[in-house]
Amino acid sequence: MSLRQLVARHPLAVSVKIDMQSPATDSTPLAIHELSYRRRVGILAICSMSLLIVGLDVTIINVALPTIGRDLHASISGLQWTLDAYTLVLASLLMLSGSTADRFGRRRTFIIGLSVFVIGSLLCSVAPSLAWLVVARMLQAVGGSMLNPVAMSIVTNTFTVPHERAQAIGVWASVLGISMALGPVVGGLLVNASGWRSIFWINIPVGLIAIVLTSLYVPESRAPRARRVDVVGQVLVITLLSSMTYGIIEAPNHGWGSRVIVTCFAVTLISLVTLLAYEPRRNEPLIDMRFFRSIPFASATVIAICAFASLGGFLFLNTLYLQDVRGLSPLQTGLDTLPMAAMAMFLPPISGRIVGRHGSRIPLVIAGGALIVSCSMLVRLSASTSYTWLFSAYVIFGLGFGFVNPPITNAAVSGMPRAQAGVAAGIASTSRQIGQTLGVAVVGALVTSRIGRGLHVNIANASRAGWWTLMGFSLAILVLGIVSTSRSALQSALRTASALNPEVLE
């Protein structure tokens, strides 16, 4: 029997079994499975606010990059660090935050994350130099690591019926599109009116409102059995991601064959091999390698990396192109990329419904195909490329990205024990941030290698290698979308679910 057939026949099997075995603790004011539908929708809305401010932070700062570069005298690599310092810390801590929330309480962790994120945003707005801005962005990321995976864990434990969960995930993913749509326009308005520092102010009121609403309406929940902190695994993950990102970003400045860069990549390889050897030996690892026996889950992890690498690279290259080649203001840049963001806003709920009814293949094939077409259209950008061509490419890119997120998230949590929902959601969120980090690092390194350290050379010609790279990521999404939804892949997901939670399938 396939996983899809199992869910179709027994949609409540997993949730009922676990709810019976895991009654609400004393610290839980109302058992999640007893919440009314209206209350559950309210919880979804509150949790979505965390994705809103994180998404806003990404798109707003992309629009402000050239202004930040001029004000703080930053090179392309400096601008890369403004973005990647955030995503790097976020990717390093997401899995730890997910398991911490499962242990100490998801609502409590969520509130702490919101508080730290608000403080980090305030410090970003007053940073006197690029170095201080990067440090403040890292503090932001510490808080951000406690938001999205923990909120997704709350949503997963709130919506236990598979088709409701898929639809809730579609709504959740559409918030990213909303933030992408609002971010460039709001960011452009703020930069034009008050300078780049004001782009961080918007996080503060939204974060404070989310803290109050979470305290009032979100019930506490945690895993029935606490997981131990995997200190060694956490250190290895941080070392791996940090050395890899530093090596890619700084290679054009130091030279790809320099001692510093070669050492960075050697540390990356050693960390990866050690992590793969160490984690399976632990009873409660930071990364449960058994998850990756499920082909849909493993594929979703790679797809998430490729999709968000494409998004990160797309935003980075287009911001530099529109402002430094076409001479547009931050507001005009935001308005010009609005067609892409609008598609990414409206399509995730449709993708979520398709996933709930027909599985992930259709959305993933549409996503991969659309991203390939869009990147191929942007390979030949020049200073005279028509805006009709640009807008068409942006719309097609938004179409692809709008369809890709719901199947990623659904594959990450479907069939996994709810006791490890935070860990599974954390791996999915980590993959997204790794992708975003790699996208900015790789395309930035390719551009820097072509034009040197400054922003005064034509970005359009130098960015072609970046667009070819993003096209490769898009092709991987298309291929894995087909492979991960085959009969054998679905059977591997069923076997993995049975091994992780055998009592549910008895």
Image: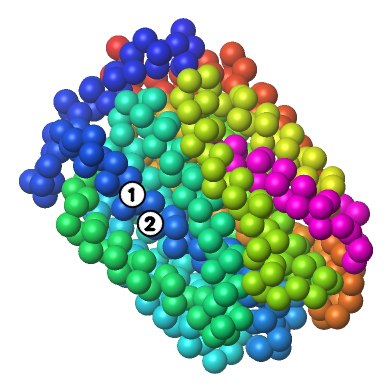
> Total number of numbered labels?
2
What residue occupies the far front of the structure in this picture? Answer: 388
Where is mark 2, residue-wise? 49
Q: What residue is shown at x 44% (from left), y 62% (from top)? A: 53
Q: Is residue 230 left or right of residue 372?
A: left
Using the image, tell me which numbered label, if any, was put on residue 7.
none
Q: Which quadrant holds residue 458?
A: bottom right
Q: Do labels 2 and 1 touch, CB within 8 Å? A: yes
Q: Is residue 451 above or below residue 238?
A: below
Residue 18 in view (yes/no): yes
Q: Which residues are magenta?
A: 379-408
The x and y percentages for residue 2 are 49, 12
Residue 98 in view (yes/no): no
The x and y percentages for residue 175 are 47, 50
Q: Does the magenta portion include 184?
A: no
The x and y percentages for residue 302 are 62, 40
